[in-house]
Image: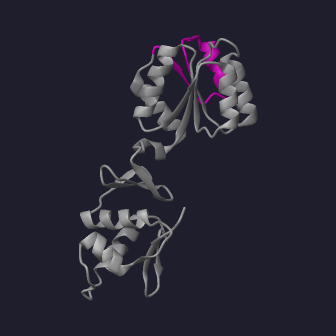
Amino acid sequence: MRSILVVEDDPQLRHVVARLIEADGYAVTAVGSGADAVRRALADHVDLIVLDLNLPDVSGQEVLRVVRTAKPRLPVLVLSSVSAGTTRVELLENGAADYVTKPFLPAELLARIRLRIGPQARSGRPPTSVEVGGEAYLDLERRELWSRGVRVALSQREFGLLAHLLRRRGEVCRREELLADVWGIGFDPGTNVVDVYVRRLRRKLTENAIETVRHVGYRLAAG
């Protein structure tokens, strides 16, 4: 899940912005001072910073300067009531990735965050999801597979097979085990149904996501 640091000294607005971003599928850390912002940005894994300018200790401009020096690839989106064109130009020239003026439209702020973080975030990974591999994850609650931000249809059996492989990720799953758990068949009827469904899943997942263990069964690649 992508991680966003929200820096806003107004407690009420900080709460509103954090909840808004969390509802779109991101992990959020919210702080109210420039010193805390710098400490979190440099010590933690952060994918984007939403930064207010008027902070009680260290100014937003100074936070931007420190972050850009230490982590030049970390995007900083300024969210401020300062609307002067010269200020906006100066901040953008000094490395801010974007600038949104308060009061803001929630939909615009989320759209700009998605744009800066990249297409993977557009699906808004839900907390009930499990990474399958590469840029693919399985939403266990909605029973959906998402790959590179695009929903990939799964049949009931395909979902059951993938969910079983995920539970045993890195371990070998025997064909008999898969027949029993996914199809409810307690014996091997001599059918190749497991192999057929594995081939279907492979076409929908990243390359080599499901490994064949010869004469035994299948294994979902670890990590």
Q: Which residues are drawn in magenta? A: 79-103
In terms of depth relative to the viewer, which is nearer, 1 or 117? 1
Residue placed at 61% from the left, 34% from the top?
75
Please say whether residue 93 is visible from this viewpoint. Answer: no
Left or right of residue 157: residue 101? right
Measuring from the top left, give residue 190's x and y in whole percent.
Answer: 27, 89
The quarter of the picture where the C terminus appears is bottom right
Measuring from the top left, give residue 211's x and y in whole percent.
Answer: 48, 75
Q: Taking 146 as reference, is 192 above or below it?
A: below
Measuring from the top left, give residue 170's x and y in whole percent.
Answer: 51, 69
Count numbered badges in the picture: 0
Q: Taking 23 as reference, is 151 above or below it?
A: below
Measuring from the top left, give residue 63's x and y in whole percent.
Answer: 69, 23
In terms of depth relative to the viewer, which is nearer, 112 or 209? 209
Residue placed at 31% from the left, 62% from the top?
159
Please say whether residue 129 is visible from this viewpoint. Answer: yes
Colour style of the rendered protein structure: one colour
Q: Taking 141 as reference, is 218 above or below it?
A: below
Residue 8 belongs to the span the image colors magenta: no
Image-quadrant location for residue 64: top right
Residue placed at 51% from the left, 33% from the top?
28
Residue 83 belongs to the span the image colors magenta: yes
